[in-house]
Image (spheres, rainbow, N blue to C red):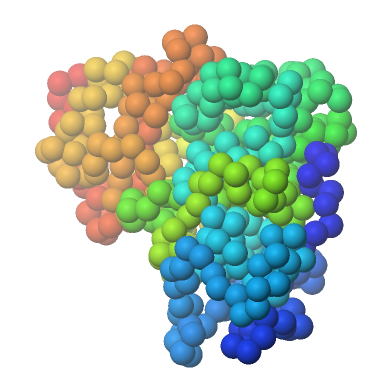
Amino acid sequence: MADTLNQNTTIVVSNKKRSSGSDECDHQDDSFFVSKKQSKSLVWEDPAAALANARHEFGEHGGVNMSIEASATFTVMEPETMRRMFAGELGPDRDFFIYSRHFNPTVLNLGRLMAALEGTEAAYCTASGMSAISSVMLQLCSSGGHVVASQTLYGGTHALLTHFLPRACNITTSFVDVRDLEMVKEAIVEGRTNVLYFESVSNPTLTVANIPELSRIAHEKGVTVVVDNTFAPMVLSPVKLGADVVVHSISKYISGAADIIAGAVCGPAGLVNSMMDLHQGSLMLLGPTMNPKVAFELAERLPHLGLRMKEHCKRALEYASRMTKLGLKVIYPGLEDHPDHALIKSMANKDYGYGGILCVDMETEERANRLMNVLQNFTQFGFMAVSLGYYETLMSCSGSSTSSELNNEEKELAGISPGLVRMSIGYNGSLEQKWSQLDNALSKMQEKMPF
């Protein structure tokens, strides 16, 4: 595992404010990180229980919600304190803050919740999902570094690994089929490979990664496992299954309203601290800082993430099953004929289903576009839009949108057909009401061209 993961530094955020007359405070209760007791307890049977078990921050005047710390900079009572903060002698562990690009109390609170959700020692939240991914890769890899990654990834991540990192940082990537464990093993070069990177459930083909086996293979060769869990919050807990680091685009399910761009890095305390280091930290020096007002908004949405995910997943399974019976080529891990159904069933947290995304392969882009046009403009089933996790259903033809960064050969290797329609199933309206809209659209399509 990378050296940055072995640091013993910890950050503790105090509940007690420093007094107005002194910069000193010895109160260090309530760790920012998930405690060892919490990580070993029964809360890990359910991520919602872990969230409920996380420390609740009250407002400055006793409000049930945490106050928003909107300050960019923070004052001190004594001149010597500032020198000590910049020297690393005083920090958030004792309620000392320098500047919100470094640490901010409201953003740290969201980080505590994300750490609880994913079962990691620490988490830090960023301005976007891509900034979280980029910052992790730049912290774990140096010039000449090597990454082994799934050949089926979100287009932006694929472009980062294929084009940007080799050009700007001399970091190269070998792409593999993560279902082929021997291929993964052969691609990892012990002593050279820094990171094994994959998505828990791939975008857009819904391939499910065998997280325990992939983690075992990587760890045998001293490689850090980084998993993008954007498609499966609550459903899968990668660290519980053996991974080291989890990244999220919080813009999706965790936000739930398609109104916020944000990301998160969840992992060991040593890694998160190193990323915020004043001299070497990728988050600190590149500055993808989350606005504390955004952090407050997101912290208010996490408590009902479990309820939302259950409904997303319930409807996705129901629609996938019904569409399959109508003769459509549906891809969904919850279907028994999906090649990874048994795998995700063995890894998934109980009662959260199999994810809220399904795909329909219409074979050609023309047929895909016709289906989406009818679904949006004639029966009002959903919206043609990228992203996912919204309360309305969102649809896109992946090959010409969110995976357009891949060339034709890369799309073929990734299993992305020209007519693959990705649907993020929403929960607005009743299930039967929305099914009627979907069924009417399919009937209209059937009249013109049978499936």
| Residue at position x 43%, y 42% in the image | 357
State the residue in front, 76 or 38. Answer: 76
User: Is 112 positioned to the left or the right of 205 in the image?
Assistant: right
State the residue in front, 161 or 345. Answer: 161
- In percent of width and height, residue 80 lies at 70, 72
State the residue in front, 251 or 451. Answer: 251
- In percent of width and height, residue 290 lies at 48, 55
- In percent of width and height, residue 46 lies at 63, 64
Q: Quadrant of the N terminus?
A: top right
Q: Residue furthest left?
A: 378
- Determine if residue 190 is in view: yes
Quarter of image, res 104: bottom right
| Residue at position x 72%, y 29% in the image | 142
User: Is 65 positioned to the left or the right of 369 in the image?
Assistant: right
| Residue at position x 70%, y 46% in the image | 279
Measured along the vertical axis of the image, is residue 408 above or below residue 19? Answer: above
- Determine if residue 250 is in view: no
State the residue in front, 317 or 374. Answer: 374
- In percent of width and height, residue 276 lies at 66, 52
Q: Quadrant of the C terminus?
A: top left
Q: Residue furthest front?
A: 79
Q: How many marks?
A: 0
Q: Residue furthest top?
A: 409
| Residue at position x 48%, y 83% in the image | 59
